[in-house]
Image (cartoon, rainbow, N blue to C red):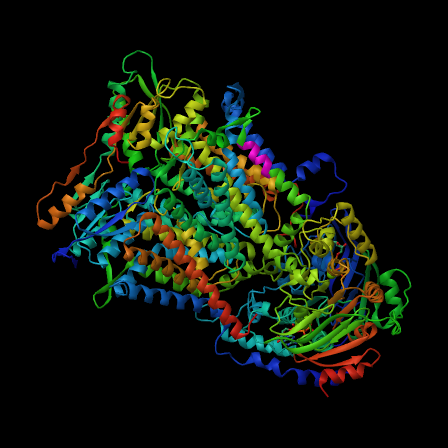
Amino acid sequence: MNARNESARTAASGRQQEPMQRRRFDPKYLPLTVTVALFVAMAATGGVLYEGFLSPQVMLNLLIDNAFLCIVAVGMTFVILSGGIDLSVGAVIAFTTVLLAALVQRQGWHPLAAIALALSLGTVYGAAMGLLIQRFRLQPFVVTLAGMFLARGAATLISVDSISIDHPLMTAVAYLRIPVGGGYSLSLSALIALLAVAAGIVLAHATRFGRTVYAIGGSESSALLMGLPVAATRIAVYALSGFCSALAGVVVTFYMLSGYGLHALGLELDAIAVVVIGGTLLSGGRGYVAGTLVGVLVLGLIQTLIAFEGTLSSWWTRIAIGVLLLLFCLLQRVFERTRRLTLGVA
Amino acid sequence: MNAGPSPPGSSHVLQARGIGKRFAGIAALEGVDLCLRAGEVHALMGQNGAGKSTLIKVLTGVLAADSGTLELQGQPIAPASPVQAQRLGISTVYQEVNLCPNLSVAENLFAGRFPRQRWSGLIDWRSVRRQSRELLEELNLRIDPDRLLGEYPVAVQQMVAIARALGVSARVLILDEPTSSLDEHEVEELFAVIRRLRERGMAILFVTHFLDQVYAVSDRITVLRNGRCVGEYAAADLPHAALIAAMVGREMAAAPAARPAAEADVPRQMVLQAQGLGRRGQLAPTDLELRGGEVLGLGGLLGSGRTELARLLFGLDRAETGTLRIGGQAVRLHGPADAVAHGLALCPEERKTEGIVAELSVRENIVLALQARRGWRRFLSRAAQNDIARRFVDALGIKTASIETPVALLSGGNQQKVVLARWLATEPKLLMLDEPTRGIDIAAKQEIMNEILRLARTGMAVLFVSAEMEELLRVSDRIAVMRDRRKAGELPGGCGEDAVFELIAGQ
Amino acid sequence: SGEKNPAGGERIVLGFSQVGAESEWRTANTESIKSAVQEAGIQLRFSDAQQKQENQIKALRSFIAQRVDVIAFSPVVESGWETVLREAKAANIPVILTDRAVKVSDDSLYVTLIGSDFVEEGRKAARWLLEQSPLKDGTEPVRIVELQGTVGSAPANDRMKGFKEVIAANPRFQVVRSQSGDFTRAKGKEVMEAFLKAEGSSIDVLFAHNDDMAIGAIQAIEEAGLKPGQDIVIVSIDAVRGAFEAMMAGKLNVTVECNPLLGPQLVDAIHAVREGRPLPKRIVVEESVFTREQAAEVFPTRRY
Amino acid sequence: MAVERDPGRTSWPRRALAHPLFWPALTLLLLLLGNGALNPGFLALQWREGHLYGNLIDIGNRAAPLILVSLGMTLVIAARGLDISVGAVLAISATVAAWMIAGGEGAGSRLPMPLAVAAALAVAALCGLWNGLLVVRAGMQPIVATLILMVAGRGIAQLISGGQILTIYYPPYFYFGNGYLLGLPFSLFVVAAVCGLLYVALNRTALGLFVRAIGGNPLAAHVAGVPARAITIGLYVFCAFSAGLAGILVSSNVRSADANNAGQLLELDAILAVTLGGTLLTGGRFSLAGSVLGALIIQTLTTTIYSIGVPPQINLMVKAALVFVVMLLQSADFRASMRGLLRRRPAGGEMR
Ligand SMILES: Nc1ncnc2c1ncn2[C@@H]1O[C@H](COP(=O)(O)OP(=O)(O)OP(=O)(O)O)[C@@H](O)[C@H]1O
Ligand SMILES: Nc1ncnc2c1ncn2[C@@H]1O[C@H](COP(=O)(O)OP(=O)(O)OP(=O)(O)O)[C@@H](O)[C@H]1O
Ligand SMILES: [Mg+2]
Ligand SMILES: [Mg+2]
């Protein structure tokens, strides 16, 4: 029986050999490719429509002005990949700025000490929320929403007014511009953001932690049965997000040179949006940190387009952002679908 | 450790004594003993819901037992989680595929124990890839380790799960129904590996509902019935009939229900006619005819396109070519809702993802398709729902505390019966069953076969997909054979196994 | 920089970044600037920040990248402008602030500020209460409830500060409750409802940080069976249309003007900057206090 | 999980304890009692001018829009969706209604009021249809699909209103949000009507079963022939419709429509209400009654903050603290670990 079966099998299995050959294009990366391509197309359109749009500094400004969003979004990517959500990021940023400003301006701390404290506080705060979520099986949405209230509340408690910072070290770093040739420059924050993205990519794709995050997002019960450290990883994910938020808070402090409880209002939604636009599934388990960077750039590009347009009233601005988002996401879906069909993957 | 089957009593590796486990009023296990020995394959047998999976979950720390003790090589252990069990050297494949569909095959094989580069501590993807190839090779599984696991059908996923368990160098290997989705060839590959491991002195626990498989590999058999231990036997000393009797608790006619002689006098109405039905990358254009009152068996190897054909007929995938006529009328199906409205039914292959709705009760799962067919306005009264649910719970012997129990809490085989019941309840014109007996015990299987034949006798057309050749030959009036995603030919029901294999092989 | 206008001269390009369109006041402010700029033949690049400082900084950066001739903006908050203003200065683009001030270490980063003084508005409201309101004489303590604007926002902080400063002079006047109404009618009404229930009818004065909250609160007072403007004296700030209607109906006692019509003054300032004329660091906008008695008379002349 | 669901053989106090609505209800009760203790007048009800008057009435009336939106949100979430555009839809509907009614003081209504209300609701439903189509047809993730309307929607509302707050001067319109029927706010009757409608739709037709099936396993529901796509679109339409209804109540209550601020952050409150009521955001388990309780809890929290007179700077801290307490109280795991009664659970938790 076996011999017979064997011959039947080999006869039928010409196709089964095929997957072993490396394909030219891995459909896994399709969404990412489409997103990048659309970004390029959109930038090109802007270049045609508006004079000076494609100048390198405008493109660099995308990074400079969105550095903090980028950093927060890297942390958020991990949270979303693990199937959770973190609404506290904007508030943690605000809290960090106020804390830094208060410590440096009012208490006379050295900025580096203050930054170290802020980063560790952010991490601990995230971990605490993660612990609540993991230990008591609370829904991440509520926990981090309460975390958002708490962090903003704490920020206003420290100071209702905004606090300007004029510590020489802080201002020096804030004004620092790193030349990238041709008279164009990047800020330190932008550099930190790029580093964060690079670190995020490595963390997500080349470490056990990263792969466990994906596994949890794909199926928590399976991850448990596979013997993965689900509890520790989940807490670490929120701690990471807390750290990223605090880091973004530091960057915002440099960006604005002030601490203010109303900084980064509604940033959590932007962060979630860029992660999702970058191709990460909100339900967890799928997506790329690199996609998040593209998502950030797309959102920045939309705003830049509108700023260059310069004739829109307040309401048309909103409508235009909506329409551009819609266009982008629709095209993303359409291209993905048709490419998928021609590639023959289900 | 020495090679070869060891004499009884030697080197107890894992010993469970007096295990008890209750779930909200139901006793799933009561005073169960189990003893795994080095270099032995131990089969755990029992009907659906007998407590096999529960026992395994207790052994591996997924569930905490209410009573009883565990010993690993004489040392008492109490694994509190699967991680701990793994660290103790117990490697497990659970009944439902418990891997992550969103990770690649290689990652699923190595998650939790990725090889790392020495200098950076990062995952060494090259060696992950290399080692996965080796592991898959061992099971003769030719799949791309870089593709996402979810892209492969359950059968392949099950093989991957097995490969993962094999990859851990463990003392104890536990396999809960590893062969339910596999065809004979894959089973052979698996058994070859199991024998090799046995030789290396590993203790293996093996659950299956296929008696031949039990006798093919196991040295010893423990039978559970209703959560109690019926006994432990040496496989060689236990005849087939005695094993069945031990599981079922009564003598059972071993003779399978025979296909009724073709009732040629009954005029058979054409129910469904497919011409050139196909879809790029899934199925070459295929013709198929189904008449009322007949059972059409669909044979072929794994991945030969049987599932695809059924899905196209049901409108679950959109056909790109060809026409479909139902009851003589040309139709275009826009989705399952359409198909259901036309009186078709498809009991899908993948029970976990496409079958059960875990949170819903047994009752709700059973009436779901029927209700969908009636539409949202013609709501089945609660009494009618209860009636239908009870009827099928009795008819198929679904073991459940009540019809209001969430389906998630049922044993695997009983979940499968619920999905089957859902489709039987719609009383369709054409019933398509894709591997409907997966994970179902022998007694229930016979009942299901009888039910199918009974339905066919009432004039229903049945399309029956199964990896089990005997089963297929037993119920089918005709057998269509798929090969390489096209129909290779059709055979009359009475033909022998050989004829079918020849067609499968394309000779 | 700049484009040729039909007359042949260089057309001035103004980049203006507005906070948003969060209130009628703001919309009037935007309208005023747009129309004044258009009349003057200045080309406007308008950008709306949706109430976010980040967006505003981005907009300023893009103005710099587009090399506009003059930048004007109404800052969302006071602090945090240092970096981007330096960039503007480095690009030789003069900056004019409207409506709100900024805190910067170096005054030369902007040319001038055209705008109201929120602290002074708070003071004016308090002064009216102490000097002209029906409660000014008497011996009974005066119980005041305060509806604050958005917590932490500059107008809320400053108006509260100014009000407190003046009211402190007379110990009879006491703020017994203070809560944020987020500058909106709905919140104003909701908070006032809670105040009325908690304090019963012992509230003498309502001080609202803007007219919208006062209008909401008036509804709450009416629904509680009291007479706004009589049983409870109501003071608010902004002087928008709705406030005048309420005053004419006798439901609001007084509103302190906060003038949004900065357009003409902005245009003057732009011309001055272009021609190199010196400008004061602060151009104060004309603002008055309107009472019920003046309401009917002034109302027809109100444009917002 | 298994323990809490078992229907058989338990005494009624245990059953009550195990009932999913027990903890939300208890929380609400504790909040109200706590308030009553702090502030004796809090729970008092008076009869004034032909209707009931008091904090409880205010809470009900204020919570009505949130309850409506939460109900819609619950159903969308039950089917594994999310709608963050509810605030914007509320603003659109309020603006449309206000714009059609408007007119000056004493000038009556520009267009007949029923027409205005119908138009507002229709526009809201259209918004829902749009959301539903983006999610179901275009296959966009719910949060992005509705983000689009969330951003653009307020713009559209402002476009209609010209950036002004539209004041309404037509007294009959005030009835929806301010009127009283049988001594109770009319808005409560609107809520009751919607609840009744939902009850019938979900329990007297198969829709309830279908929604739960879609939420539990969308693919399985689809394979079973459930018209999952049509139902999902329908749920988005309903959600937007309920937001539209809430828009009518809100604009009627403050006699104006503020395109920029109406329903600001409503989506967060609604999702919070839904979660506090015991609905899982990941789909599968939902409770409409729970969402109603959740919305009432949130409104009670807000009113509490206003009436105990905390300084506004610490509003958020108080709110955070209360939310933490509420959700910990509701967490079975927290209660278990507090009691330390339950058997030591395996670290991995139970299998599903
Ligand atoms: N979490 C649970 N809660 C309640 N009952 C459960 C739970 N898990 C299992 N059961 C019940 O325990 C009994 C034994 O189930 P188990 O899964 O061990 O059966 P099995 O022998 O593996 O059956 P099958 O052959 O169908 O896989 C069944 O009646 C099942 O309904
Ligand atoms: N044993 C296998 N080895 C490699 N690939 C496989 C194997 N079995 C299935 N596949 C892959 O899975 C995909 C889908 O197979 P599918 O299960 O749908 O086919 P089928 O004929 O219905 O098989 P089944 O017998 O499981 O019903 C095919 O593309 C095939 O490449
Ligand atoms: Mg089992
Ligand atoms: Mg198949």
D23 on left or right of D313: right
**Residue plotted at (67% across, 84% down):** A10
- The location of residue C32, given as percent across then percent down, is 24, 42
Between D114 and D327, the residue placed more toward the observer is D114
D225 on left or right of D172: right
Between B232 and A215, the residue placed more toward the observer is A215
Quadrant containing the N terminus of chain B is bottom right
Q: Quadrant of ligand 3?
A: bottom right
Q: Residue at the far top: name it.
A: C139
Quadrant containing the C terminus of chain B is bottom right
* Quadrant hosting residue D326: top right
Q: Residue at the far bottom: name it.
A: B507
**Residue plotted at (55% across, 38% down):** D294
Residue B402 visible somewhere in the drawing: no
Does the magenta-highlighted stretch encompass residue D252?
no
Q: Which residues are magenta?
A: D187-194
